[in-house]
């Protein structure tokens, strides 16, 4: 699945033949890309943009370019829901929007045209094709309507559609040029469903919360930073912890992420370090196994690949015990990746609904495209509960 994983990270960001597990972009590389120039590309930041920010706690979320990308993702989800497109198409379109804004912070087209073009490209990539006229009509209706008035997309005049068509088609070409015509992508949605079934979590609460968190992750650069297995496992992990009755039953790093104070340094693991992740563990959606070639192995490289596949097959559990510490390690997911995912998605909920990303008028206009308010409220409630609870990471760690 490593080839599929490369869809979220354009090839120029990695050296050829690199064996690093980061086939995706890191926070530092994204922040550097937003703040620097590359030969042959105009990457001047928009007016009022922040100076290059190190990958700190909110180094990306509060960047003006990423705020613009998040607003575009809201519009994409609003239009896609109006068209009845599935979750995988919505996620792909939002992923394209982030890739465009990372490599072209000042697009030559309007934000509405870029978002519409991303949705058009994603519909073709996921084979959920809609007529161009339908996409343009729904985009026009949702970009011009007021909250108390709704225009029927079928009644949009043909002259209006013809006026929009050249701009959106030009934006579509711009999107494809920016991503380098790299249409490979992967989705954590099916993997999340498998994890939720293996863990046997309640569908109406924990599973639903995790699905909402998974969908909201595409409003950020998290699917660009982490493979699908990290996004799926991180969503389920956060949902399970938010469903606990007491902070004492919550994982220590979840408490640290919810806390407003800086997180203390991680404790040294009591067990031996885990072996490195095999190179083919990026997608997390296929079972490993013996090689198809039944001939005798003739090289140490072939034996190494076969051994890695066998180890990966043994790592796949038949069920999950979410109460166990670091259950995600059974899938080859490092704990620091889960921590990074949880911390960033929690910060996103706080920043988005504090009007730091989208003004109230915009959120009222595109109410159907917003992230989950229920999850944001649950995160806020947990933070208020932690204000009145004394806990120490060391004590909680000893309990777990």
Image (tube, grey):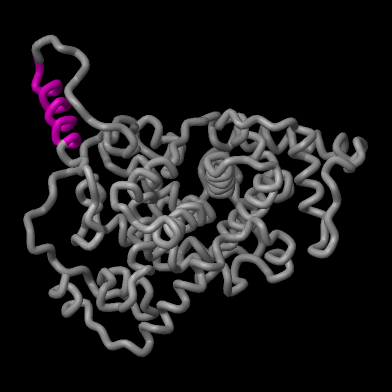
Q: Quadrant of residue 290?
A: top left
* Image point (46%, 72%), residue name: 378
Q: What percent of the width, then of the height, locates residue 99?
A: 53, 44
In which quarter of the view is residue 126 placed? top right
Q: How many marks?
A: 0
- Residue 201, relative to residue 174: is it above or below? below
Q: Is residue 307 left or right of residue 20?
A: left
Dominant SS of magenta comes to: helix
Bounds of the magenta segment: 298-313
Of residue 93 and residue 364, the one placed in the foreground of this image is: 364
Q: Residue furthest top?
A: 295
Q: Is residue 168 above or below residue 199?
A: above
The vertical placement of 125 against 245, above or below, is above
What residue sits 33% from the left and 71% below the top? 244
Asked if the magenta segment contains residue 300, the reply would be yes
Closer-to-camera residue (101/385): 385
Q: Could you tell me if residue 103 is visible in this image?
A: no
Quadrant of the rendering where the C terminus is positioned: bottom left
Q: Position of residue 322 (x, y in %)?
A: 25, 59
With 378 as the anchor, is 121 left or right in this view?
A: right
Residue 69 place in picture, x, y as percent? 60, 54
Residue 129 highlighted magenta (yes or no): no
- Using the rendered image of the protein, determine whether residue 165 is visible from the camera's viewpoint: yes
Q: Quadrant of the N terminus?
A: top left
* Residue at 49 percent of width and 65 percent of height: 348
Q: Position of residue 161 (x, y in %)?
A: 85, 37
* 399 with respect to 280 (left or right): left
Image position of 273 (left or right of 241): left
**Residue at left offset 65%, top offset 30%:** 129
Q: Quadrant of residue 361?
A: bottom right
């Amino acid at each position: 699945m490593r080839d599929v994983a490369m869809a979220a990270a354009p090839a120029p960001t990695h050296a050829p033949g690199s064996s690093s597990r980061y086939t995706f972009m890191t926070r530092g590389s994204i922040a550097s890309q937003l703040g620097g120039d590359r030969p042959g590309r105009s990457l001047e930041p928009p007016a009022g943009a922040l100076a290059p920010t190190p990958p700190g706690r909110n180094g990306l979320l509060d960047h003006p370019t990423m705020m613009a990308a998040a607003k575009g993702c809201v519009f994409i989800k609003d239009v896609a829901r109006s068209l009845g497109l599935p979750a995988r198409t919505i996620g792909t379109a939002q992923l394209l929007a982030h890739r465009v804004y990372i490599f072209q912070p000042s697009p030559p087209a309007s934000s509405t045209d870029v978002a519409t073009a991303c949705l058009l490209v994603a519909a073709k990539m996921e084979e959920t094709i809609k007529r161009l006229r339908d996409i343009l009509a729904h985009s026009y209706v949702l970009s011009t309507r007021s909250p108390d008035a709704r225009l029927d997309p079928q009644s949009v005049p043909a002259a209006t559609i013809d006026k929009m068509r050249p701009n959106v088609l030009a934006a579509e070409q711009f999107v494809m040029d920016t991503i380098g015509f790299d249409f490979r992508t992967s989705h954590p949605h099916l993997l999340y469903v498998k994890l939720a079934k293996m863990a046997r979590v309640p569908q109406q609460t924990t599973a639903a919360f995790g699905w909402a968190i998974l969908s909201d992750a595409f409003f950020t650069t998290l699917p660009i930073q982490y493979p699908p297995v990290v996004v799926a496992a991180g969503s389920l992990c956060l949902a399970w912890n938010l469903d606990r009755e007491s902070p004492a039953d919550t994982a220590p790093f979840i408490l640290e992420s919810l806390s407003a104070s800086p997180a203390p340094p991680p404790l040294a693991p009591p067990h031996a370090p885990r072996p490195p992740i095999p190179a083919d563990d990026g997608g997390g959606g296929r079972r490993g196994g013996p090689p198809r070639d039944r001939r005798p192995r003739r090289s140490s490289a072939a034996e190494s690949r076969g051994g890695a596949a066998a180890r990966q097959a043994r790592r796949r559990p038949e069920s999950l015990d979410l109460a166990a510490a670091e259950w995600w390690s059974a899938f080859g997911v490092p704990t620091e990746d889960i921590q990074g995912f949880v911390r960033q998605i929690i910060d996103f909920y706080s920043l988005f609904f504090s009007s730091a990303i989208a003004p109230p008028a915009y959120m009222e206009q595109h109410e159907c495209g917003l992230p989950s308010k229920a999850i944001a409220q649950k995160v806020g409630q947990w933070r208020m509960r932690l204000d009145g609870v004394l806990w120490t990471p060391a004590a909680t760690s000893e309990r777990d």
